[in-house]
Amino acid sequence: MERIDKLLANMGLGSRKEIKAMVKRGEILVNGAICKDAADKVDVTSDVVTAGGRKLRLRTSFSFMMNKPAGYLSASRDERDATVMDLLSEEHQRLGLFPAGRLDKDSEGLLILTNDGAFAHALMSPRHHVDKRYFVRYDGILHEHAVTAFESGITIDGGERCLPAKLELLEPGEAVVTVQEGRYHQVKRMIAAVGGRVIYLKRLAVGPVLLDETLRLGKYRELTDEEFQTLAILSGLWRSEE
């Protein structure tokens, strides 16, 4: 059970003060009856709440995909640099979102933002084997055995041994890299280990969920129910009923 003012504020309907004002004006209905007290509690799984005549989809967790532009940190806040949170509307900043994993400041592409800690942890944990796929442009010439080196688990600078990964060579200077980890600058360091230097990096997909290419850089949208459920099942958070 959740207090209605807290729940609706967390859903981005307004501040708690604004929700209380809506209740006072008789604009919030619970199961068809006018809500009299903003402290009343509702069951998000069964109660029907309307605000201003609009039926609300009650929930406490939210997840979005963003087409992250270069120049923004994948962080909730930073004292010096702009973060992806600065790209959110005021309404969505109220939801308590944070990045599920990271993309380097100078990298672009699919970044998932959520306020669901269990979902974020499950999605990024290497033990759940969720693929992260990247398009890479690089300078230099990769070693002849770069593909097999990736497949067997490459050792990067500092002596770190990566899990087996996939390197698909495209046009000269272009490749697609698929990893299941999120080490610091991992893709850049892996390419460097086989003779290249990354000059452009874009995340294309997390698991089977592809970046929505209709999203311009810096724009975002909520994950569809199908996308969220697919990732939740893949990461072990849910079990498929099939």
Image: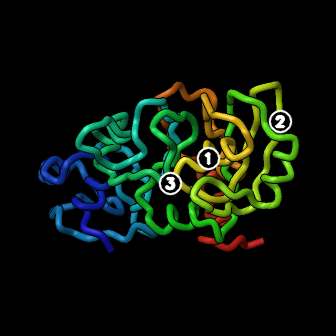
Q: Which mark is residue 101?
A: 3
Q: Residues within 10 Å of mark 2 (few under 14, many from 20)?
A: some
Q: Are marks 2 and 3 in contact (CB under 8 Å)?
A: no
**Residue picked out by circle 2:** 169
**What amino acid type should be assigned to the residue bearing mark 2?**
Leu
**Which element is circle 2 on?**
strand
- Classed neighbour count for the residue bearing mark 3: other residues with Cα under 10 Å, few (<14), some (14–19), many (≥20): some
Q: Residues within 10 Å of mark 1 (few under 14, many from 20)?
A: many
**Residue at 52% in and 48% down:** 112
- Counting the numbered discs, the total is 3
* Picture disc at residue 48: none
Front residue (pair 180, 212): 180
**Helix or strand or loop: what does disc 1 sit on?**
helix
Residue 128 located left or right of residue 50:
right
Measured Cα–Cα span from mark 2 to mark 1: 17 Å
Disc sitting over residue 189 in the figure? 1
Q: Amino acid at mark 3?
A: Gly
Q: How is the image coloured?
A: rainbow
Residue at (37, 71) in percent of width and height: 43
Q: Nearer the viewer, mark 2 or mark 1?
A: 1
Q: Is residue 217 left or right of residue 146?
A: left
Q: CA distance from mark 2 to mark 3?
A: 26 Å
Using the rendered view, name the quadrant where residue 5 is placed.
bottom left
Between discs 3 and 1, the one toward the N terminus: 3
- Which amino acid type is shown beneath numbered disc 1? Arg
Q: Earlier in the sequence, mark 2 or mark 1?
A: 2
* The C terminus, quarter of image: bottom right
